Amino acid sequence: MAQAAAKKPGQDAYTWEGVDKQGKKVKGEMQGASVAIVNATLRRQGINPLKVQKTRKPFFNMKKKITAKDVAVFTRLLSTMLLAGIPVVQALDIVGKGHENPSMQELLLTIKQDIESGTNLTQALSKYPLYFDSLYCNLVQAGEQAGILDNILDKIAIYKEKTEGIKGKIKAALFYPAAVVVVAFIVTAVLLYFVIPQFESMFKSFGGELPALTQMVINMSKTFQQWWWAIIGGIVGTVVGIGHAYKRSPKMQHGLDRALLKAPIFGVLVKKATIARFARTLSTMFAAGVPLVEALDSVAGASGNRVYYEGVMEVKNDVSTGTQLQTAMNSTGLFPNMVIQMVAIGEESGELDKMLSKAADFYEQEVDDAVAGLSSLMEPIIMAFLGVIVGGLVIAMYLPVFKMGGVV
């Protein structure tokens, strides 16, 4: 049976049955723009097609998304293959067929076909900017031009692994409190909608005036029962609206990112992670031989924070007019003195990439320590938060019972 080719954009999958030159019945799958093109392709291959039909797509698309981790794993494997002396096409074939994610397999085999048709690796990767950004493609291009693609891919793999590691740690640090807030909201909603009305009907039989806290909670319950759809819809709509506005508005990005940098507890963690990403990216670009001004353009996009993006673009503009990198960085007020001093030493000694790499190592360790400390700090804060929310509702409901017991 013929093997299915990797799907290309604008083409559909077809299953076919036919007879080859020896008269044997054969069947398989093929990509094509139409049935006629598939028929013509089969005839050129010496197969007389008997039946060709488009493969039905499943009702639910079960394909896994290609993640940044998939790209990092692919880069590491491709780097290892090239360092072992395996040609690019063969390496892509091995990595593609062996990848656990079917979507990544399809992408890599398509890239392999592009290279077999005469396209270089940079051009093949640049067709998929969603997975291989300009920074990635610029580094690969520098490696191809200098004939050191294997070494450059090794540096990219290290860069990807480090940056994804930092992202993972920050997500882990933020996930716990976010999950607790969501659970607290759900528990509070259940109490307000189902439990507190039962207490309210019981309190009516007591007679007398209810404590102020109890009456406030009962009023909240009545409001939530009447307007629950508007409250939940408003919260969801606000979150979605802010997300869309953040993607489209540079001013909102700047405002929210600046607020995040100044936020208590989390602000320090985000700032250290951003500086680590800046240092690691610039070190990787500079070590690959990318000119400093061009490298800063890619570094700005990889910073992950609008405030630092604008700051790095200011640094780029200053450097392009002849200002030293350390002076340009110092003028933004965004970088710690230690990083500026290490950049100054790197510029004077001609080892800027090594000094930036050391700065990145230092701040990546700082992020690790900050996440560990944050996890320890957040646990008692979260317990206190849950105690105030849920415990406050329970106390409010039992205050009338205590008051009645006191009277008795």
Image (cartoon, helix red, strand yellow):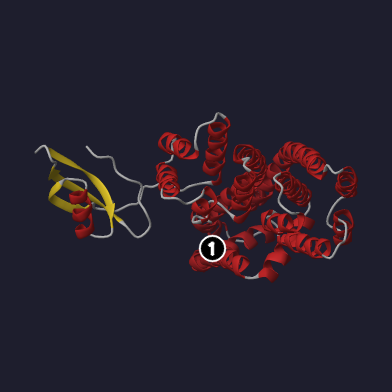
Q: Front-most of 310 and 313?
A: 313
Q: Secondary structure at mark 1?
A: helix
Instruction: Examine the rendering and report whether any part of residue 394 can be seen.
Output: no
Instruction: Examine the rendering and report whether any part of residue 124 can be seen.
Output: yes
Single out the residue that lies furthest toward the left.
23
The residue depicted at 11 percent of the width and 37 percent of the height is: 22
Give, as a three-letter code, the residue at label 1: Val
Vertical arrangement, residue 43 with respect to residue 332, above or below = above
Location of residue 170 in the rendering, given as x and y in whole percent from the top left corner? 67, 45
Q: How many marks?
A: 1
Instruction: Report the quarter where the N terminus lies.
Output: top left
Lateral position of residue 40 relative to residue 118, left or right: left
Residue under pointer 1: 236
Location of residue 403 in the rendering, given as x and y in whole percent from the top left corner? 67, 51
Single out the residue that lies furthest toward the top.
84
Location of residue 35 in the rendering, given as x and y in whole percent from the top left corner? 20, 58
The residue depicted at 28 percent of the width and 55 percent of the height is: 32
